Image (cartoon, rainbow, N blue to C red):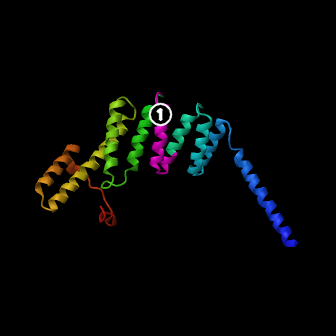
Amino acid sequence: MKQQFINILLTIIIITITTGCSSKQDQEYNKPATYWYNKMIKQIANFRLDEADDTYTSLESEHRNSPLLPSAILIIANAHMDDEEYAMANYYLDQYLKRFSLKKDVDYINFLKVKSNFLAFKNQYREQELLSQTIKQCDKFIAKFPHSSYIYLVGDIKSRLLMTSSLFEKEIAGLYGRVEKPKAKIFYNNKAKTKWKKIDDIQDIDIPWYRYLFE
């Protein structure tokens, strides 16, 4: 009898807790835009980006025309960039460009995309596609926003990427030199110079020995 009473009591407690949690979750809808916005800011400040993503989704779903939405997108995009989650940052930036392409700060958003891809570039020998795409992205920015206040920052990023690309071509030339293929060596040396004329002035990247073995 005593055990039966304990089982009934435990069942009541579980049902009460579950119902309470469920009720709390069920209330998380149809909230003002400021509620979702402030909640997202708090979650980002506490480094809970996954929760912030969900909260942003609620804001975007319930208040598609809220004036807070552009700011919310930029905040969460920058939060992901700071957390080195560049794919997610670019996702939000793309969403911004799709929805608010006529806003005056569109050059800033495009600059952030360039910056995000640049920061995502970690390895000069393994991420050539990202390197090439980001250089093209820089060219597109320079052509589209020649008077932007971010033009010099984009130009600096492009220069760094071109030097990196030039070093890569030089590395290939050196490889062909070691296997005694002089024509290929000349070809890639010339290719390196087309990307950065003063290639000998570029300081080689210091790669740890344990990484260099796998480059």
**Residue annotated with mark 1:** 98
Picture coordinates of residue 91 (x, y %)?
47, 43
148 or 137: nearer the viewer: 137
Picture coordinates of residue 213 (x, y %)?
29, 66
Residue 95 sits inside the magenta stretch: yes
Q: Is residue 200 left or right of residue 82?
A: left
Vertical comparison of 15 with 45: above or below: below
The residue at 46%/38% (across/down) is 94
The residue at 50%/43% (across/down) is 77
Picture coordinates of residue 79 (x, y %)?
52, 46
Q: Is residue 117 left or right of residue 212?
A: right
Residue 94 sits inside the magenta stretch: yes
105 or 14: nearer the viewer: 14
The residue at 37%/54% (across/down) is 122
Vertical comparison of 24 with 177: above or below: above
Quarter of the image with the C terminus is: bottom left
Q: Is residue 82 left or right of residue 29?
A: left
The amino acid at mark 1 is Lys
> What's the magenta region?
79-102
